[in-house]
Amino acid sequence: MIRLLTFALLFQALSAATPNIVLIYADDLGYGDLGCYGSKAIQTPHLDRLAAGGLRFTSAYATSATCTPSRYGLLTGNYPWRKKGNRILAGDAPLTIEPGSITLPSVLRKAGYRTGVVGK
């Protein structure tokens, strides 16, 4: 129920205006690794420029420290460990998100966005 409410609120907020959304979801990237979050050791000017003109998350938590369950949580809004068999999966594993499920990209498409993914 909370997941549906969250997606409904997101859909309502995005229906009023459609800003561009670039969601960067990276493995092994720490909070302090980007200049926009205070890193002095690593130069990230392009990401810093994107962050300066957009929304930065400053208080967030990962649902999992491993890739497959973490992506599952982001895409579905569900806690990944509540789904039996949700673990790090091989590249040729069966789908863990059932076709037709409500996901972040499906909510964005209903709001008029075109969605895509690059990477895993």
Image (tube, rainbow, N blue to C red):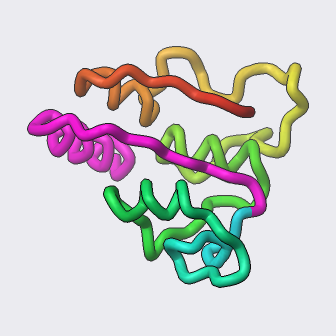
Residue 80 as seen in the image, left or right of residue 58: right
Depth check, front residue: 101 or 61: 61
Q: How many labels does the image show?
A: 0
Rendered image quadrant of residue 90: top right
Residue 56 place in picture, x, y as percent? 40, 65
Q: Residue 14 location in percent, x, y?
A: 20, 39
The residue lying at 71 percent from left, 32 percent from top is: 119
Q: Which of 100 and 28 is in front in this view?
A: 28
| Residue in the image at 72% along x and 81% along y | 41
- At 21% from the left edge and 35% from the top edge, which residue is drawn? 18
- Answer whether residue 94 is magenta in the image: no
Drawn side of residue 17 relative to residue 87, left or right: left
**Which image quadrant: the C terminus?**
top right
Q: Residue furthest top?
A: 99
Q: As rendered, which of 51 and 73 lies closer to the eye?
A: 51
Q: In this image, 38 relative to 84: left or right?
A: left
Q: Residue at x 64, y 29 (%)?
A: 118
Q: Where is residue 36 in the image (x, y as percent from the top left)?
A: 50, 72
Q: Is residue 28 shown above or below 100?
A: below
Which contiguous range is marked in magenta?
1-28
- Percent from the top left, x then y, of residue 93? 85, 23
Q: In this view, does 92 lie above or below 38?
A: above
